[in-house]
Amino acid sequence: MKLISLFLFSLLPFAVMAQQHPDVYITPMGPLVITPVNHGSVMLRIKGKVIHVDPYEKSVDYATLPKADLILITHEHSDHYDKKALDKIMKPDTHIIAAGSVVAAGLKGASVLKNGESTQWNDIRIDAVPAYNIEHKSSNGKPFHAKGVGNGYILSFKNFRVYIAGDTENIPEMSKLGKIQVAFLPKNLPYTMTNEQFVAAAKVIRPKALYAYHYFELNRDSLTKQLPKSIELK
């Protein structure tokens, strides 16, 4: 995956604000800058537009980050739907796309996207895909994330596709996502995936670049050894 050093250098003021440095990818729509911010939060920048996914203020002050042109919210849990973080990056013309559960939890003015639905924003196709638990359940027997409630999102920059999975296990629908260049997969217990599920999901999706996110602990060396050599663990 080719990086543009000069372009990356120009973005260093944004890099120091987040927990990880941005990566730059070449897409048919121009350079795409992807920054894992913290926990399940991701920021993308392309053609002067800023996209925030699940902004969450646990360890990052969102007042220091660029304001959002678009915000995507996967589901209603407080580490994904954080009103404080939203208030700090909203502009009068910020567009929000969210799962219906987020609107039901009180978010106003958002466009609802259900599993299987898609929309277009600034020439970027956005698909809402399933995100749910099969094995991991709370003490009452209900899945931590029920099927049909939360979204994962695929953002298509022409034929360059980024998959941000949301809170999910390695569900059967992952085999139907199509070609993915960059993927964000969650890896924490008991809410999302075990190491084995994470690796299994990666082998099904086979992105060129794979980001582990939404984790408490990460043994990068162990995961790298289990992944196909064609997948770069970021």
Image (cartoon, rainbow, N blue to C red):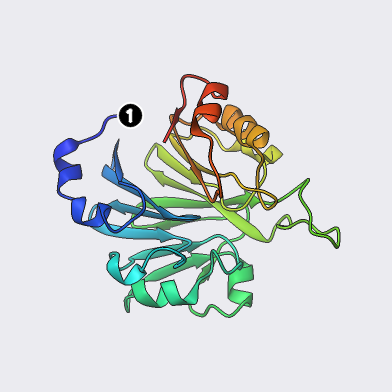
User: How many numbered marks, from 0 up?
Assistant: 1
Question: At x 61% / y 60%, what residue is drawn?
Answer: 114
Depth check: 118 or 214 in front?
214
- Residue pointed to by mark 1: 1
- Residue furthest to the top: 229
Quadrant into which the N terminus falls: top left
Quadrant into which the C terminus falls: top left
Location of residue 93 in the rendering, given as x and y in whole percent from the top left corner: 33, 75
Q: Secondary structure at mark 1?
A: loop
Depth check: 21 or 148 in front?
21
Q: Amino acid at mark 1?
A: Met
Depth check: 16 or 156 in front?
16
Is the residue marked by circle 1 packed among few (<14), some (14-19), or many (20+) residues within 10 Å?
few
Q: Based on the displayed image, in which of its 4 quarters is residue 2 positioned?
A: top left
Question: At x 28% / y 68%, what residue is drawn?
Answer: 64
Location of residue 6 in the rendering, given as x and y in whole percent from the top left corner: 13, 40
Location of residue 74 in the rendering, given as x and y in whole percent from the top left corner: 56, 60
